[in-house]
Structures are given as structure tokens and as C-alpha cells.
Amino acid sequence: MIYSKIVGTGSYFPERILTNEDLTKIVDTNDQWIVERTGIRTRHICAENETSEDLGCFAAQKALEDSGLSPSDISGVIFLTFTPKFRVPSAAVYLQNKLGLPNCFAFDLNSACTGFIQGISVASDMISTGKYKNILVASGEKLTSVTNWKDRSTCILFGDAGGAVVLQASDAPGLRSYNMHSDGSYSELLHINDDQVLTMKGNEVFKVAVKSMGDAAEQAIRDAGLTLDDIDIMIPHQANIRIMQAVAKRVNLSMDKVMQNIERRGNTSSSTIPTALDEGIKTGRIKRGDNILFAAFAGGFTWAGALLTY
Ligand code: UT7
């Protein structure tokens, strides 16, 4: 069996920080409501000319350096985004060129907030065939390019970020399990509308998100042949601290085992999990050998879970 292990991580946040106080000047809201209802205090937002592709490239550059590999070692790029600047060429090809990766495939995967789990799952299966050795999975989400700044129930949630990992073929686990699901009958509850801005019926999404992420997390543990006691840390998609608390309660995990970066970063879609992972590793909270539980939920709806030994 060929597993995939993570040999490098990176994240990138734009310089500009938008505080809850700043948002009170844009919409009718207040710091207390945002903190109590979402857990968010600040988020990073792109400069006008910065793109999702840039965010992913900066993060990928760091992940590549972290891995110690050279550009010619990379056999493929999977770029996660639903906010690319251009539809063609893909963001993945932009990254391939920008980082000077000489021999690799490159394609985008659009699954919004579920993108990272889907990306590492696809990459891991490709590696397991023996055909590819090192695959770069990078996310870049400029959510502020699709934010409706007149809608106080959504504009307070989002931030911009890029995250990346390098997955490498390994004899030892690795990604031990993953599961992916979809139900398009919910598409109206969370989507980009005709005006090209994100619209969401937040409280309806909330309930389905808790159940779906909880189920996906439990399935990931079961499919890996492990139990709850084996889990060192959970990294859920960072949509709302109350969703994370409810999911943790549902799967019976205490909150001190849940990694969160939503307080400072907001909801950055497919970048939430890789950036939280990178921050966990770089701060020493996540160590080699730790069993990490992932769960995510997104517009579609799509949802996914995975279990990875770091
Ligand atoms: O990442 C993909 C998946 N996304 C998610 O999973 C997000 C899921 N949803 C959520 O995180 C939450 O539903 C929100 C944070 C979006 C909203 O929180 P909520 O507790 O569900 O609030 P609500 O929509 O039920 O609104 C409660 C009240 C309303 O006022 P009334 O009708 O009770 O008078 C809203 O108008 O809060 C009001 N409200 C606000 N007040 C101050 C909504 N947004 C704001 C705001 N500031 N920014």
C-alpha cells in the first residue's frame, strides 16, 4: 500500500486586516454580536490587485521550501478555489508557471470550503497508484471578491487566504481515510447569485453543517479503524466557532482538542483547514505522529471528512 504523508505546509494572509470595528462603518453591526455569534474578531483582506492565484502561490512557495524538495520533484498541482481571477487558464497552471515546476500536471478543483479535503483525497489516490510521488495541493480564496458588503449576515464572516501542503508517497500512513458527499438539492441556501456575490441562508446552513460535519468526522475515524481516543487534534472547516463547538460536542471531543484560527482569520473557505494545519505545525501544537481529524462543509451542499497521521 502506498500512503501519502505531508512533507511541507505553508500559509499566506494578505497584509490588510479588517476588524469588527471597521465593519461597523460599513454595515449595521457591532463587535459583540460578531464575536458572540461567530467567534471572529479580525480577518485579512486582499489589496485590490491581489488575486486568489497570488494567495495560493505565496502559500505553495512556503510549503515547497518547507518540504526541502526542488521544483523538479513536484509531479502535480491541484489548486483549490472558487474565486479564480481567470476561468482559463486555471489557477493551477498559473501556479505551475509562477513556481517554475518543470514536469507536472495542473488542474483546479472547485468545491468551496470542502476543497482541501477533496484535494488531498484526490492527490492521495493518485499517489497510491505509484504514478506520482509528490503533489502540491494549494488553496487560494479571495472571498472578498464575491462578498456582498451590504449584507451584514455574510460580509462579517469572510477573509482572504492561501494555504498549501506537499503530499509525498510513503510506506507509513499518511492519509488513512477520507469520505466525500454531496446533495445539490440545497444549492439555493448557499451560492453565488446572478450579481456574482455570495448569498447564504445562514441559520439553515448552520443546522445541516453541524450534522454533516459530525457524521463525516465519525465516518473518517471508523474507516481508519481508529477510535475517538486515538485522535490528537481535530481541524474542522472554520465557518463559525459555534458550528465547531456543536460538531465537537456531537462527536464527543473536547474543545481543547479542536484547532481554531477563525478568531483572527475569519472564514477563508478552502484555505481554513490548510492554514490552521500550518499554524498548528509551526507553533508546535501538531507534532509528527499525531492523528488529525478533518471535517468540512460547503455550498452545494458538499461535505467531507478525513483522518491523517502527520
Ligand atoms: O463556510 C460555508 C458554510 N457556512 C456556514 O456554515 C455558515 C453558517 N451560518 C452561520 O454561521 C450563522 O448562521 C450566521 C453567523 C451567518 C448568522 O448567525 P445566526 O445566529 O444564525 O443569526 P440569524 O441569521 O438567525 O440572525 C439573528 C439576528 C437577526 O435579527 P432578528 O431578525 O432576530 O431581529 C439578524 O438580522 O441577528 C441579526 N443579524 C445581525 N445583527 C448584528 C444578522 N447579522 C448581523 C450582524 N450584526 N452582522
Image (cartoon, rainbow, N blue to C red):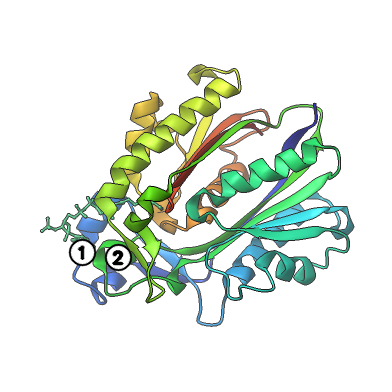
Q: Amino acid at mark 1?
A: Asn
Residue receiving disc 1: 30
- Where residue 250 sits, quadrant-wise, is top left
Q: Which quadrant holds the C terminus?
A: top right
Q: Does residue 213 lie above or below 237 as drawn?
A: above
Residue 205 % position (x, y): 32, 48
- Residue at 82% across / 50% down in the picture? 68
Q: Residue at x 63, y 34 (%)?
A: 287
Q: CA distance from mark 2 to mark 1?
A: 7 Å
- Percent x, y of residue 82: 53, 63
Badge 1 residue CB within 8 Å of ligand 1: yes
Instruction: Determine the residue positioned at 53% across, 69% down.
Output: 14
Contact between labelled residues 1 and 2, with CB atoms less than 8 Å apart: yes
Position of residue 118 relative to residue 189, above or below, is above
Q: Is residue 239 left or right of residue 125?
A: left
State left or right for residue 271 relative to residue 136: left
Residue type, mark 2 in image: Asn
Above or below: residue 227 compared with residue 46: above
Can residue 119 be seen at all in this image of the molecule?
A: yes
Q: Earlier in the sequence, mark 2 or mark 1?
A: 2
> Of 285 and 56, which appears nearest the observer?
56
Q: Quick one: which residue is furthest to the front in this view?
A: 185
Residue marked by disc 2: 20
Circle 1 Cα neighbour tier, 10 Å, few/some/many (<14 / 14–19 / ≥20): some
> SS for tag 1?
loop
- x and y percentages locating residue 233 in the rendered image: 52, 32
